[in-house]
Image: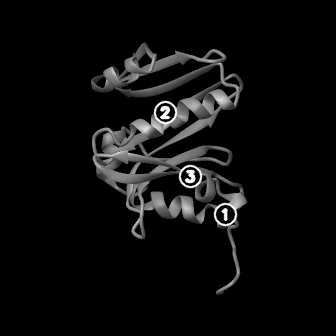
């Protein structure tokens, strides 16, 4: 199959426009994917997420299973280089007026901050009027720092919401 490109760059947001960040002294690359209707076009996305989606320890930390549907945007932070070890990930589901951050997870503390920032930027670019997420109360400082407010308690989790304004 050499010389045949099955997944051209325009079907995947990651390659040419990937952003680079430094986390704990290591260079990272933030890849962006859109879950497509065609399973063959999702191979790289789910190839990177597969071991995390199958992990019972990560399911426990997230409070549920990792799921997706066509149209959802995924942001995956990897170490730059051949191994492309996943350091953090999260997804953004666009809704009628707002957006929801789902599955925000980091293997090392702080590695999820560029993913959260990218979710905020992407929600604004896609015209969302507000952004919500549900996470542990122990992570409230992170969300408060980015202008989210706690809305309600849901079991061991809290729903956070941020109103987005133009130029916000």
Residue 149 visible to the viewer: yes
Up-down: is 54 above or below 127? below
Mark 2 and 3 residues: CB-CB less than 8 Å, in contact?
no
Mark 2 and 1 residues: CB-CB less than 8 Å, in contact?
no
Q: Residue at x 31, y 43 (%)?
A: 60
Up-down: is 26 above or below 3? above
Res 130 quadrant in image: top right
Question: Which is more foreground, mark 3 or mark 1?
Answer: 3
- From mark 3 to mark 1, how far is it between C-alphas? 18 Å
- From mark 2 to mark 3, how far is it between C-alphas? 14 Å
Relative to the observer, which residue lies in front, 104 or 116? 116
Residue at mark 2:
117
| Label 2 SS | helix
Q: Residue at x 56, y 23 (%)?
A: 131
Q: Residues within 10 Å of mark 3 (few under 14, many from 20)?
A: some
Picture coordinates of residue 39, whole percent (x, y): 66, 63
Q: Residues within 10 Å of mark 2 (few under 14, many from 20)?
A: few
Residue 41: which disc?
1
Q: Earlier in the sequence, mark 3 or mark 1?
A: 3
- From mark 2 to mark 1, how far is it between C-alphas? 26 Å
| Label 3 SS | loop
Question: Which is more foreground, mark 2 or mark 1?
Answer: 2
Mark 3 and 1 residues: CB-CB less than 8 Å, in contact?
no
Res 105 quadrant in image: top left
Residue 18: which disc?
3
Question: Which is more foreground, mark 2 or mark 3?
Answer: 3
Q: Quadrant of the N terminus?
A: bottom right
């Amino acid at each position: 199959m050499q010389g045949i490109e099955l997944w051209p760059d325009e079907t995947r947001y990651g390659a040419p426009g990937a952003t680079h960040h430094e986390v704990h002294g290591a260079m990272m690359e933030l890849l962006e994917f859109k879950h497509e209707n065609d399973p063959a076009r999702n191979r790289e996305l789910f190839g990177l997420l597969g071991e995390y989606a199958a992990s019972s320890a990560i399911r426990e930390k997230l409070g549920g299973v990792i799921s997706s549907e066509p149209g959802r945007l995924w942001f995956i932070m990897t170490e730059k280089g051949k191994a492309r070890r996943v350091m953090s990930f999260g997804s953004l589901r666009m809704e009628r007026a707002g957006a929801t951050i789902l599955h925000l997870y980091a293997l090392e503390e702080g590695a999820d901050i560029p993913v959260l920032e990218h979710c905020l930027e992407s929600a604004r670019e896609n015209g969302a009027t507000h952004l919500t997420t549900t996470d542990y109360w122990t992570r409230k400082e992170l969300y408060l720092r980015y202008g989210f407010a706690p809305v309600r308690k849901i079991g061991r989790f809290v729903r956070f919401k941020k109103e987005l304004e133009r130029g916000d």
